[in-house]
């Protein structure tokens, strides 16, 4: 019974510690990679840099394991980082731009639907008219 | 609005400024990669003991470092030109406002329907109420409706000024004897601050611009109270 109570007290202490840490994190200063790239707020930046780092490690390590050449492996690692980061970046930004366009079309569609409901401009009304005429 | 130790842009309040932010992110990523490559190359140069004194030609590397920068420049230029032309699109403004720069205040003229003009002086630090922003508040804000394209004609009565609102992506020079036009379309209501951006004398830093963007029905009510 005493051991169970002590375990509960430790759990409560742990939860309190996590809560206090989270409170402290709210006044965390923003992190910028090399002081210039705000990876927290720029869409796709964090993912691109993380994938690039992974690609760099895989390429560099793989090259070293195959050839045992340190300098050339470092070059391959850096080249891999740049290529993978840029590749992920352009791919992610392209999809993000397409998504924004679709969101805008959907938003305009919803706005127009409410605006034109039951008028002669209502697209649903035009559709039912064409269905009934067919 | 701006905050201390700010390094980046303010949050966008218009579609054009959003596009500019995305373009900035795109260009910054390219610059970041080039900087990483250059830093790495410099570190390699500094840590090698090898020398090569009889290079005669280097066709392959010269081809690569000609074509690759050309491709990078095209990747930067195309979105840039797209935004440039987007800023010049004809969009049928609903309202036209004239902004006249003086030493050292702005005058706003709403003359579409009635002749309404007012001056906008900076609120001095002694007259600020708690919570107001030093060197940014004005006595009469420029009040505008949201989500409507607005034409702003900027000019000056004396020397060069520049009418700037960073969160809307606006910066237009106020030149005496010339009318410069810019189009404004705010996506959301709020207060947007800017400062004169062309040196114009002793109080150049003390002639701010404040835009108060409100929904159209409140803008109409405000207009009726002013006329």
Image (spheres, rainbow, N blue to C red):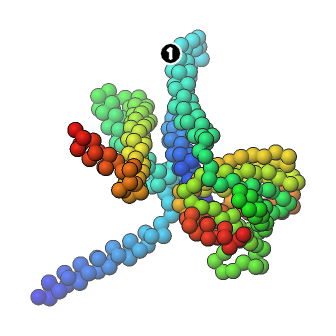
- Location of residue B65 with respect to B156 vertically, above or below: above
Percent x, y of residue B111? 74, 58
Determine which quarter of the picture holds residue B79.
top right
Q: Chain of mark 1?
A: B
Give the x, y percent position of residue B76. Answer: 55, 34
Which image quadrant for residue A20? bottom left
Residue B222 vs residue B123, the one in the foreground: B222
The local secondary structure at tag 1 comes to helix
Q: Which residue is mark 1?
A: B60
Q: Residue at x 72, y 78 (%)?
A: B128
Task: Say which of B55 and B150 sits in front.
Answer: B150
Q: Position of residue B176 (x, y in %)?
A: 85, 49
Q: In the orientation shown, which residue stands out farthest toward the front? A: A133
Residue B104, percent across and down?
Answer: 83, 62
Q: Residue at x 56, y 21 (%)?
A: B66
Res B137 visible: no
User: Who's the residue at 57% across and 47% down the image?
Assistant: B16
Residue nearest the observer in this picture, B225 or B53:
B225
**In-image side of B105 versus A45 (left or right):** right
Looking at the picture, does residue B182 appear above or below residue B106?
above
Decide which of A81, A93 is in the foreground and name it: A93
Q: Residue furthest left?
A: A1
Query: From this viewpoint, which residue is outermost toward the bottom?
Result: A2
The residue depicted at 37 percent of the width and 29 percent of the height is A69
Asked whether, in this view, residue B169 is left or right of residue A107, the answer is right
Q: How many marks?
A: 1
Crowd tier of the residue under label 1, counting other residues whose Cα lies within 10 Å: few below 14, some 14–19, many 20 or above? few
């Amino acid at each position: 019974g005493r051991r169970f109570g002590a375990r509960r007290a430790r759990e409560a202490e742990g939860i309190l510690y996590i809560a206090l840490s989270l409170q402290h994190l709210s006044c965390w200063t923003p992190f910028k990679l090399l002081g210039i790239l705000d990876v927290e707020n720029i869409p796709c930046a964090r993912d691109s840099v993380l994938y690039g780092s992974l690609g760099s490690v895989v390429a560099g390590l793989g090259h070293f394991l195959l050839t045992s050449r340190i300098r050339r492996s470092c070059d391959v690692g850096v080249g891999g980082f740049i290529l993978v980061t840029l590749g992920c970046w352009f791919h992610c930004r392209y999809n993000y731009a397409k998504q924004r366009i679709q969101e805008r079309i959907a938003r305009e569609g919803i706005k127009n639907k409410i605006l034109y409901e039951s008028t002669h401009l209502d697209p649903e009304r035009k559709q039912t008219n064409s269905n009934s005429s067919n | 609005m701006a905050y201390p130790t700010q390094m980046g842009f303010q949050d966008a309040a218009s579609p054009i400024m959003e596009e500019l932010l995305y373009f900035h992110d795109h260009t910054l990523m390219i610059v970041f990669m080039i900087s990483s490559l250059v830093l790495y190359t410099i570190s390699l140069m500094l840590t090698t003991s090898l020398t090569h004194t009889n290079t005669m030609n280097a066709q392959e590397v010269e081809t690569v470092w000609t074509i690759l920068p050309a491709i990078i420049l095209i990747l930067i230029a195309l979105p840039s030109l797209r935004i440039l032309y987007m800023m010049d699109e004809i969009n049928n403004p609903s309202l036209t406002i004239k902004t006249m720069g003086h030493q050292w205040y702005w005058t706003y003229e709403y003359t579409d329907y009635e002749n309404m003009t007012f001056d906008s002086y900076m609120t001095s630090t002694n007259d600020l109420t708690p919570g107001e922003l030093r060197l940014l508040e004005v006595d009469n804000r420029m009040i505008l409706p949201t989500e409507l394209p607005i034409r702003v004609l900027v000019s000056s009565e004396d020397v060069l000024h520049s009418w700037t609102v960073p969160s809307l992506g606006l910066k237009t020079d106020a030149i005496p004897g010339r009318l410069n036009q810019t189009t404004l379309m705010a996506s959301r209501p709020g207060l947007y601050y800017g400062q004169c951006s062309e040196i114009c004398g002793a109080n150049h830093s003390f002639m701010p611009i404040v835009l108060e963007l409100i929904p159209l029905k409140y803008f109409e009510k405000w207009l009726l109270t002013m006329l």
